[in-house]
Image (cartoon, coloured by chain):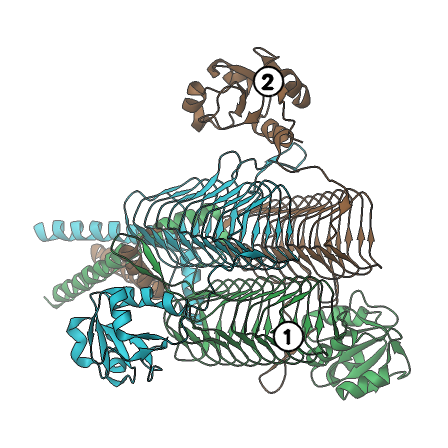
Chain colours: A cyan, B brown, C green
Amino acid sequence: MNRSSGYTLEELGLRIEARVVGDSDRLIHSLATLQTAGPGQLSFFANSRYLKQLKASKAEAVLVTEAHLDDVQGSALVVADPYLAFARLTHLFDWRDPCSPGIHPSASIDPAASVSPDAEVGAGVVIAAGTQVEAGVVIGANTSIGRDCRLGSGTRLEAGVTLYPKVRVGERVLIHSGAVIGADGFGFAPDRKGGWVKICQLGGVLIEDDVEIGAGTTIDRGALDDTHIERGVKLDNQVQVAHNVRIGEGTAIAGCTAIAGSTKIGRHCTIAGMSGITGHLEIADGTHVTAMTLVSRSITEPGAYSSGTGIEPHQQWKRNVVRFRQLDELARRVRKLENRLEHISTEGQKDDGC
Amino acid sequence: MNRSSGYTLEELGLRIEARVVGDSDRLIHSLATLQTAGPGQLSFFANSRYLKQLKASKAEAVLVTEAHLDDVQGSALVVADPYLAFARLTHLFDWRDPCSPGIHPSASIDPAASVSPDAEVGAGVVIAAGTQVEAGVVIGANTSIGRDCRLGSGTRLEAGVTLYPKVRVGERVLIHSGAVIGADGFGFAPDRKGGWVKICQLGGVLIEDDVEIGAGTTIDRGALDDTHIERGVKLDNQVQVAHNVRIGEGTAIAGCTAIAGSTKIGRHCTIAGMSGITGHLEIADGTHVTAMTLVSRSITEPGAYSSGTGIEPHQQWKRNVVRFRQLDELARRVRKLENRLEHISTEGQKDDGC
Amino acid sequence: MNRSSGYTLEELGLRIEARVVGDSDRLIHSLATLQTAGPGQLSFFANSRYLKQLKASKAEAVLVTEAHLDDVQGSALVVADPYLAFARLTHLFDWRDPCSPGIHPSASIDPAASVSPDAEVGAGVVIAAGTQVEAGVVIGANTSIGRDCRLGSGTRLEAGVTLYPKVRVGERVLIHSGAVIGADGFGFAPDRKGGWVKICQLGGVLIEDDVEIGAGTTIDRGALDDTHIERGVKLDNQVQVAHNVRIGEGTAIAGCTAIAGSTKIGRHCTIAGMSGITGHLEIADGTHVTAMTLVSRSITEPGAYSSGTGIEPHQQWKRNVVRFRQLDELARRVRKLENRLEHISTEGQKDDGC
């Protein structure tokens, strides 16, 4: 979008149902943080930690709740949820161009592919036979799409994405550069000579509407059935999704998390970065996993879960790590102490009783 | 492969030396899990956890051991190792087309490269001077291959792979999209002003026959000698292999594992996902490492190894993490208690002796 | 560089201000390790662990300090810091060709882009409008560069790199294959129906001079301000840098480390592989973090920091993991024991006092 003339506060207020306090004709040409915003810029206040910055902000206008209206120096857009309102307004100032239909002459499109005349296909793009590209789809430079894929309307693949054959993608999906969708799941059967026989991965990948997939993220095709990413799932960069995983609607997974084969993650979960989830598990709806946690068993109750230890100075940590290796023994020694003390007390009581 | 007419049970039985029980003329057109299989589909039973599914399966036929023949509802292919037999049969139903020799007109091949007329080179592929591509090689769309590489016969590079110069790849190797082979190892010498002087990485990468390399996996070139991946190694997605690592024959490494420089991993090891192996180590043949383990010392005895802590509810975990920081002190306190109790007991005995 | 005739020891000595001991006319054609070096090869001795190899080395010449001159069998180049001298000399033997100006005919360059006639643009490269490419820049095959980027002089993008719009890269920067710079930061606001509203990422990425970025590394664009990589930063492969992170001058970060949003990492830090750094932290200059550490709080004092536990045999580890879950309870039991023992001692003293 990004209208070069900007938007009046009145226009912005109407978009997000905000009450405008101040001069509603003032033009907003961009968004900025409380600290850096100046004339013509709109900011937002969504975390009380930044109250000092709000009071000092030189922003033309600020998105705030009623409660903090008095702390605003310039104009205000009063809303119930400033963070959500800010999110909505960012779409007016985005750098992405709308779909500009047409096929770049350097693209290689198989005659047996079907590309909507209302789709945009960038330079160096390769599309194989049997693939359907719907209206409003944007495909970035040097992206490769295998056979028999489908890209639903309004979906956007950035530059350098790879889709293997038989990947079905819904509408309004955003896939970032370097993502690889539909590579073979990691499946091998041991033979009798210490080698491995590859299990060809015969399933596909199904990605529902409104999903976002981060840069360098890999989602493997299923062994027999499909790997399945439900509606509204958000995956950050460098996430690894193994074969036959299913991720439930609205779940968000932060960077570098890996999910092993056949695990089912519930709806509306939030998984922090660098977590690992082992295979064949079920994770309840609404589960939260903290950063760098290893989830090695199914989770049946929603709630927050963690593993690992906290950061500490290296020398101190080294001593504690040695003790961790002795922890079972330490626990046995404590039990022994308790027993002996129990014995001494009993003896003492007997003595007292004499 | 994937013959559209399917295969009779007799044909399949001959391929894997199975005994056919039932109507050997029945056609199998695809493979499926016990739960989803129906008429014309073959399934397999390899894990007693799924006995209920076996008994209820509507599969046309099932791969089973003799012991479970009576639990099969339809026809059966009786084998010693159903999982291995299943792996072998997946190759008959794979979606990959065989090599279709020819060079796509949009490919850019340096005149000083040597590409077999029996190789298949996809759209947008770039091949630099001095590189040899043997018969039966398939190179996917938009893949880039640097100078003086070699791709052995039957090797397949999927779309969007990158090979730096001087990467030698054996026969029947499969490299998935987004993999980068031969980037510079991470080598810098500190100068006297707090900066870094790059150590140019002068070695290459050697990949032996029958290796598979997952999507987004990176294997760096050696500093002076080659990084070396031995025969039959299987690397999952997003694995990081640093310079001068050597991985022994038949070793399998799951997703997102990282191996630091100059480490030698033995033969027939299995390394679970998200593990980290620090540099200059030696890992014994037949070692198994569990998920998200940090291997920070050499392993001289085969066996299973682990590090980290188990998952638990976040609030409980927080309390235990605090205690971990005090673990060395706790151990000292237990020792003190033991000493004092020893003393008390001795005193007690002395008293008794009075 | 890589002059095919090689360099005399005298020439090499002049480059690094070394004293030549031996025949200064001898030609060095390549570098090698102490173990593998032979005639015509130069090696280096920088770690006393390799003294045996030094004494047995068949290298034509070795880079050594004065102190170890007597241990050298062939000629020697005597320097204060052999590792640094070796790093400098590797540049003479590198396989990278110097910039060979020109644009490959298969490249797609927008007429509104500005590419220096002294830059090299490889096959299949795509450059969008508004982007400036300075002299001496080398852009590898199938690399895609979005709108309004800038590549400073002497910068090199290997094959298959992706730059989103508005990424500014300084001079002499090296970006490896598969790296994605400027993808959207992971920002979403929860709406009231359990879904997510995308926060468009309106900032860019600023990469200063002399930075190196590893294969498959992802650096997200800022939400409003830029993500910022300062001068001389070195990032290994598969590093994830989230939106609005700032990494201070000269900091080196090893493979597979992830840094969450808005964290500021100081100057001259060294972060080992697979570490995770959570969001909105500040890490002091000169901090060292060991492998697979989770940094979950700001670090105000330089020094070494760690988290996690050490590797141990799996069965033993399992017992200790169980005890970790009981650690808080164990600590309470020890406290109780201490109290009871205190009580018993006091009682004992009272008894004594009778």
- SS under mark 1: strand
Q: Position of residue B224 (x, y in %)?
A: 74, 66
User: Left of C162 or right of it: where is A343?
Assistant: left
| Residue type, mark 2 in image | Leu
Q: Position of residue C323 (x, y in %)?
A: 35, 51
- SS under mark 2: strand
Which is nearer the eye, B343 or B171? B171
Q: Position of residue C250 (x, y in %)?
A: 55, 80
Going by the picture, which residue comes out furthest to the top?
B23
User: Left of B98 or right of it: where is A321?
Assistant: left
Which quadrant of the figure contains the C terminus of chain C?
bottom left
Going by the picture, which residue comes out furthest to the front?
A117
Chain letter of the residue carrying label 1:
B
Which is nearer the eye, C131 or A310? C131
The answer to whether residue C303 is visible is yes
Q: Quadrant of residue C225?
A: bottom left
The tag earlier along the polypeptide, 1 or 2, is 2
Q: Is residue A30 above or below residue B244?
A: below
Which is nearer the eye, A262 or A227? A227
| Residue type, mark 1 in image | Phe
Q: Position of residue B140 (x, y in %)?
A: 67, 49
Q: Residue at x 39, y 79 (%)?
A: C300
Chain letter of the residue carrying label 2:
B
Residue at the spot of label 1? B188
Q: Residue at x 28, y 53 (%)?
A: A337
The residue carrying pointer 2 sits among few (fewer than 14), some (14 to 19) or many (20 or more) residues within 10 Å by Cα, namely many
Q: Is residue A110 above or below residue B347?
A: above
User: Left of B274 or right of it: where is B251?
Assistant: right
Residue at the spot of label 2? B27
State the CA–CA distance, disc 1 to disc 2.
Answer: 61 Å
The residue carrying pointer 1 sits among few (fewer than 14), some (14 to 19) or many (20 or more) residues within 10 Å by Cα, namely some
